[in-house]
Image (cartoon, rainbow, N blue to C red):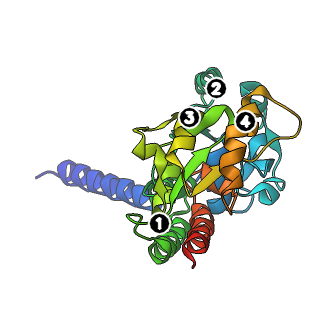
Amino acid sequence: MSVFGRTSRRMRALAAALAFGLCAAQPATAAPQRVVSVNLCTDQLAMLLADEGQLVSVSFLSGDPRLSAMPARARDYPANRGQAEEVFLMRPDLVLAGTYTAQASVAMLRRLGIEVVEFAPARALSDVPAYLERMGRLLGREEKAGRLIAEFEAGLAALRRAPEDGPRAALYSANGYTTGQGTLSDDILSAAGLRNIAAEVGRAGGGPLPLELLVTAAPDLVITGARYPGASRAEALLDHPALAALMADLPLRPETGGDWVCGTPHVLKAIAALSALGDALEAP
């Protein structure tokens, strides 16, 4: 073999070694440095997991205690209303959105070359660890996500009860809205040892429950949504005399809140509160 052949082979080997070394030194995926969340539930997942300075804005909804489990924490961040123009000016390298976030804004941000990752609404308690794991991976915070997942699963195991013979409960809010099987709220009730009457009357997912069905079902517990100031036709049904008569016979009148809304570890607080209510109902 000529000296030129040996030199060429050595050069190729050196180039391959250098390329391998550069690839090994390069991180697989660099964590985003400027993250903007435009959805109530991605707000909370990001606030739980983001590194200091990594999350630069959350949606204005996270400051509302009737919807958010973390309103005080949300006030540490500038609020946004999910408009593409305002988000673009924040210079994000990652935007977190829900699948029902204004699609025009999401599409515009993507056309502008900004990465947008969407999360679907949680429909079961099993979504909580899956969403923590996904958000941890997106933010480069896998280790913290793993700790939160372990804490959540241990907490849920300690709280979970069998609902077969537990008190019968109804979720009832503005416009007579309720949630049945296949929803996060139903899973929360079940984990607390309560039976959801929406399942008894054949309701799956979310939708209106006629007041007549609610009254004739005679639940042991009616859980209403938090009322907003002022008056609204949507909430007028909650003042109906038939519902007032039903509620008058019930010793407890709980309300849903921010702990119910999103698939985060805060659902454990809702389960614990419901378990205590169930104990009170079954006490002699």
Could you tell me how far apart the alpha carbons at marks 1 and 2 are, in whole angstroms? 37 Å
User: How dense is the environment of label 1, judged by Cα within 10 Å: few (below 14), some, or many (20 and up)?
Assistant: many
Q: Residue at label 4?
A: 240
| CB under 8 Å between discs 1 and 3 | no
Q: Residue at label 3?
A: 212
Could you tell me how far apart the alpha carbons at marks 4 and 3 are, in whole angstroms? 11 Å
Q: Nearer the viewer, mark 1 or mark 3?
A: 3
Can you say whether 220 is above or below 280 in the image?
Answer: above
Q: Residue at label 2?
A: 102
- On the picture, is 36 further left or further right than 181? right
Report whether residue 60 is seen. Answer: yes
- On the picture, is 257 further left or further right than 114? right
Q: Nearer the viewer, mark 3 or mark 2?
A: 3
Residue 193 numbered tag: 1
* Percent coordinates x, y for residue 230 in the rendering: 89, 35
Amino acid marked by disc 4: His
Picture residue at 62% right of the left edge, 35% below the top: 176
Amino acid marked by disc 1: Gly
Q: Earlier in the sequence, mark 1 or mark 3?
A: 1
